[in-house]
Image: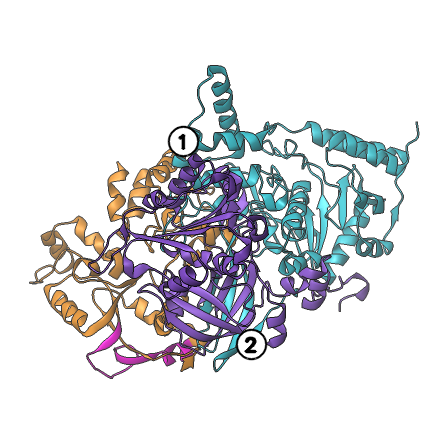
């Protein structure tokens, strides 16, 4: 028989109490949602291209819907039970409190399974995680959004913010390059962006087709089409690793200060909370310090781009 | 069975043995705690060890053993045509296995030694992928039933089938084993694919590499450490050729 | 000259550790216990709680004993004179495999079960560097932006008894300032001859000890403790110069030193597994075999393993052995932003001892320094950014 005087008392960790121990009151719901996500139903699935689908999610619990808020540029961990979790940037507007939109490319294990999911299925999201684009700081300036391929997905959220607050910005140019015309995302919104929101959209493809009647070439060729006033321009860049270097050094040469260029990096996060270290870039976590960085920080990070 | 809009169907399953000991197939009947659930996932169409049913179209086929006769080649090609997914099952199927020892001698010598005064038709040992296309490999001598379960579940649920990319050391350290090199033995753990939960080394038996090389192994560094410790190079040669799993790396040996 | 216990401890700490004597020290109570009574204390504790302590498991080819933290059921099971365990005590707090969540499916919906709870254990004989490692893990896993309840549960339910020891020839914890420890344990025992000098750092430990014969330390006990600490401090044979190491690591990011050591590296992950502070992990999810549920598991991973930095689509951000090895050193000796850029290496040299390829922090860091110094003397250009 154990002698009770010498038995170490068991101390259990209660979920609610643990979250409540966080000094910052505003972060308590965030802490609660770091391992048990918001359950969502998939309310719509739109096939955008051969490789990408747009998933529209609706958080089931109205109370949870009320507390879920994000900023443009942040990402989520999307959970498909049994298959696993995958980091996905949010593509929808942060003012849309009813639905979340995630543009997903069939690339890995979880996303391949997601492509077989039907409308009405349940998934869960943890987050939102990471840094965001400083939309307020950018206000009052010209905006240059540069997207390569799937890089359009994370840029759609800041673009929506710009569109919703269009009067706060001067000229907005979107440079968008893909390999083939069939890979262009959100083509159904191009007219809306151009006609209603007065966004100057410039698209370019590497390999044109017979029907393609716009520019052919690399994304940097688009710089010839626009005039940039470096003193009043903020740039947002997202695309494959090779693109960052080329585009950012070009913008650097034009004279846009490095701290006014923002990039969104991609790594394979496993936790989203700066613990698993899978997404380390230099000494920085893509998940908590990023994914949005200003170019100055990235320049100084080893292995970043 | 439905989950999240997915429909999980039983896999039409068959298992065949070629030149082998049938030990890997026997593993399929192991782990009784999950055996019923495991068999629920399979519609057994042809499996001598468990069922007398015989059909001839399959979603997945396990092939155990290596190929060492002409009639085995024909039989394997026929099975390949009937199967959607062909799985090389066990070390013999994946690499040739212990049977590959035969290839160190001439066919005449081998026959004279084993079947003196008999007419025997036999070939040098081939692994399954030398004869037909292999979709998935499950190495191990014998295979780990746990890994087989995981892979079958992945196939049923449409998840990606993966093998660990790291070497045995990772799991061996998690078992708090004393490194066998520290005990003066040559162990192939640092260059062998993990996933076996380091069963052999936990029992203080050096790894012989039955699961084949792990991803992007550093063979020169491994040989260097064997040399530096002045361990028996003959012992190393024997271990590395034991399952024929390091075929592509054998040149480093000199 | 008479010195109060507290005064002398502050003095000792100042002398032999650069760690600031934190507020935890103020709550500390000091006692002296005879070795016979200490045995009775340990026996009682071990009898009433699942306990783990150092035990010899093997003798290696050099004839040295190999120790591990294993279950113990009596005082005599414990090798109190052990040097260091081959693997650290990390896995009591960060298991090699840990279930994070369990899903039970019903229709398209599911229930998710999460359990942070764990049974209390006693961990006996941790070295100062091992306890420092726990303090570093506390910093990373509890004081960061997202504290880990899984870790907290285990940390709270582990009763840590520390013991000081004379260093092994390859220990370099003094260089890392982790050869003494002021906090992070329930009870710390210093061998002062016929008795143990106890630093009691928790009410639990204090309550247990009430039932045993202890006395307040005398002046000469304090002196013997100072002597003991002096002896330990002066017994270090290995020294690693870590001044300005973070910036050297930054500057030497493209150094050929990494390729040199990378070519030796087997990418086997052993170093990270035995390390007391390597905490990087991987999350895996799998269906239950009856397909009615799933589990999300965490497993300790190593940045040396080939697929650590692979992203969806297959691109590997660190394809070469040297890239990955460098990363481990970067994490260990430069530190990451999330834990205030502090170095997480405690200098136990477990990785160095366990590495089959002979890669050890002392040689790698010295190599980097040489590289740096030759750079300075030759005034050659630093390698370009790639």
Above or below, comparing residue C154 to residue B213 in the picture: below
Q: Residues within 10 Å of mark 1 (few under 14, many from 20)?
A: few
Which percent across, then down, holds residue C146?
Answer: 63, 56
Q: Residues within 10 Å of mark 2 (few under 14, many from 20)?
A: some
Which percent across, then down, holds residue C289?
Answer: 43, 74
- Residue at 90% x, 32% y: name it: C3
Real-space Cα separation, disc 2 to disc 1, in angstroms = 55 Å
Q: Which residue is mark 1?
A: C260
- Residue at 32% x, 42% y: name it: B236
Left or right for B152, reference C11: left
Left or right for B188, reference C342: left
Above or below, comparing residue C231 to residue A193 in the picture: above
- State the scheme by which the image is colored: by chain
Colour of the chain lettered B: orange
Q: Which chain does the cyan colour mark?
A: C
* Residue B150 falls in image quadrant: bottom left
* Residue C333 falls in image quadrant: top right
Colour of the chain lettered A: purple
Above or below, comparing residue A173 to residue C373 in the picture: below
Secondary structure category for the residue under label 1: helix
- Residue at 51% x, 62% y: name it: A77
Residue range (magenta): B35-60
């Amino acid at each position: 028989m154990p002698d009770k005087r010498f038995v170490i008392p068991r101390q259990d960790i209660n979920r609610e109490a643990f979250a409540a121990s966080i000094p910052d009151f505003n972060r308590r719901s965030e802490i609660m949602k770091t391992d048990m996500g918001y359950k969502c139903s998939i309310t719509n699935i739109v096939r955008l291209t051969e490789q990408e689908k747009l998933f529209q999610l609706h958080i089931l619990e109205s109370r949870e819907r009320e507390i879920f808020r994000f900023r443009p540029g942040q990402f989520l961990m999307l959970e498909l039970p049994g298959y696993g979790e995958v980091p996905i940037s949010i593509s929808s507007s942060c003012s849309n409190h009813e639905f979340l939109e995630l543009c997903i490319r069939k690339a890995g294990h979880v996303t391949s399974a997601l492509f077989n999911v039907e409308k009405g299925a349940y998934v869960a999201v943890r987050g939102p995680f990471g840094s965001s684009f400083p939309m307020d700081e950018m206000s009052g300036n010209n905006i240059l959004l540069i997207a390569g391929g799937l890089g359009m997905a994370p840029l759609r959220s800041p673009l929506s913010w710009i569109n919703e607050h269009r009067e706060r910005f001067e000229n907005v140019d979107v440079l968008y390059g893909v390999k083939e015309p069939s890979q262009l995302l959100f083509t159904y919104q191009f007219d809306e962006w151009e006609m209603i929101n007065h966004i100057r959209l410039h698209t370019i493809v590497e390999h044109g087709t017979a029907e393609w009647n716009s520019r052919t070439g690399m994304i940097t060729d688009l710089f010839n089409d626009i005039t940039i006033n470096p003193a009043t321009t903020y740039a947002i860049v997202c695309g494959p690793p090779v693109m960052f270097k080329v585009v950012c050094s070009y913008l650097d040469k034009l004279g846009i200060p490095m701290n006014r260029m923002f990039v969104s990096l991609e790594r394979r996060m496993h936790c989203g909370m700066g613990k698993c270290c899978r997404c380390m870039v230099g000494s920085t976590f893509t998940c908590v310090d990023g994914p949005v960085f200003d170019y100055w920080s990235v320049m100084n990070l080893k292995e970043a781009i | 069975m439905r989950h999240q809009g997915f429909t999980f169907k039983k896999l039409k399953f068959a298992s065949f043995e070629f030149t082998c000991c049938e030990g890997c197939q026997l593993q399929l009947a192991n782990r009784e705690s999950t055996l019923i659930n495991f068999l629920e996932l399979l519609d057994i169409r042809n499996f001598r060890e468990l069922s007398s049913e015989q059909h001839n179209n399959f979603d997945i086929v396990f092939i155990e053993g290596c190929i060492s006769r002409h009639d085995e080649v024909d039989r394997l090609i026929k099975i390949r045509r009937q199967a959607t997914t062909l799985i090389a099952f066990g070390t013999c199927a994946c690499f040739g296995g212990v049977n590959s020892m035969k290839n160190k001698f001439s066919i005449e010598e081998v026959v004279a030694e084993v079947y003196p005064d008999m007419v025997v038709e036999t070939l040098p040992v081939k692994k399954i992928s030398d004869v037909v296309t292999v979709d998935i490999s499950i190495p191990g001598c014998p295979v780990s039933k746990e890994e087989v379960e995981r892979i079958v579940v992945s196939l049923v649920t449409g998840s990606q089938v993966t093998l660990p990319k790291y070497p045995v050391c990772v799991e061996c350290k998690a078992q708090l084993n004393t490194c066998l090199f520290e005990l003066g033995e040559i162990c192939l753990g640092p260059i062998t694919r993990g996933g076996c939960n380091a069963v052999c080394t936990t029992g203080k038996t050096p790894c012989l590499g039955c699961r084949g090389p792990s991803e992007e192994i550093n063979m020169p560094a491994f040989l260097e450490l064997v040399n530096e410790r002045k361990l028996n190079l003959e012992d190393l040669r024997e271990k590395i050729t034991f399952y024929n799993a390091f075929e592509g790396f054998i040149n480093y040996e000199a | 000259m008479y010195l109060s216990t507290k005064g002398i401890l502050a003095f000792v700490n100042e002398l032999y550790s650069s760690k600031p004597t934190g507020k935890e020290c103020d709550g500390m109570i000091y006692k002296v216990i005879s070795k016979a009574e200490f045995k009775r204390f340990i026996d009682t504790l071990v009898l009433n709680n699942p306990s783990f302590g150092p035990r010899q498991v093997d003798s290696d080819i050099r004839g040295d004993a190999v120790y591990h933290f294993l279950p113990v059921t009596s005082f005599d099971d414990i090798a109190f004179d052990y040097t260091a365990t081959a693997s650290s005590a990390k896995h009591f707090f960060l298991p090699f495999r840990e279930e994070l969540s369990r899903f039970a499916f019903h229709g398209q919906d599911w229930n998710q079960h999460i359990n942070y709870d764990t049974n209390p254990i006693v961990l006996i004989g941790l070295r100062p560097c091992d306890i420092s490692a726990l303090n570093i893990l506390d910093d990373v896993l509890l004081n960061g932006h997202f504290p880990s309840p899984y870790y907290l549960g285990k940390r709270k339910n582990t009763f840590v008894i520390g013991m000081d020891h004379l260093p092994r020839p390859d220990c370099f914890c003094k260089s890392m300032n982790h050869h003494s420890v002021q906090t992070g344990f329930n009870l710390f025992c210093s061998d002062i001859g016929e008795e143990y000098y106890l630093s009691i750092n928790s009410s639990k430990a204090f309550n247990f000890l009430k039932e045993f014969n202890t006395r307040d330390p005398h002046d000469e006990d304090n002196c013997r403790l100072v002597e003991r600490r002096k002896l330990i401090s002066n017994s270090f044979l290995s020294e690693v110069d870590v001044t300005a190491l973070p910036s050297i690591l930054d500057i030497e990011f493209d150094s050929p030193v990494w390729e040199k050591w990378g070519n030796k590296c087997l990418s086997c992950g052993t170093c990270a597994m035995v390390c007391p502070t390597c905490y990087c992990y991987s999350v895996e999810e799998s269906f239950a075999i009856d397909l009615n549920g799933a589990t999300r598991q965490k497993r300790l991973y190593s940045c040396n393993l080939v697929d650590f930095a692979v992203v969806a689509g297959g691109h590997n951000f660190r394809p070469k052995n040297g890239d990955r090895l460098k990363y481990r050193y970067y994490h260990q000796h430069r530190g990451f932003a999330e834990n205030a850029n502090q170095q997480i290496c405690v200098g136990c040299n477990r990785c160095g001892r366990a590495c089959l390829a002979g890669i050890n922090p002392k040689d790698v860091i010295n190599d980097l320094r040489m590289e740096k110094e030759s750079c300075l003397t030759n005034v050659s250009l630093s390698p370009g950014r790639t």
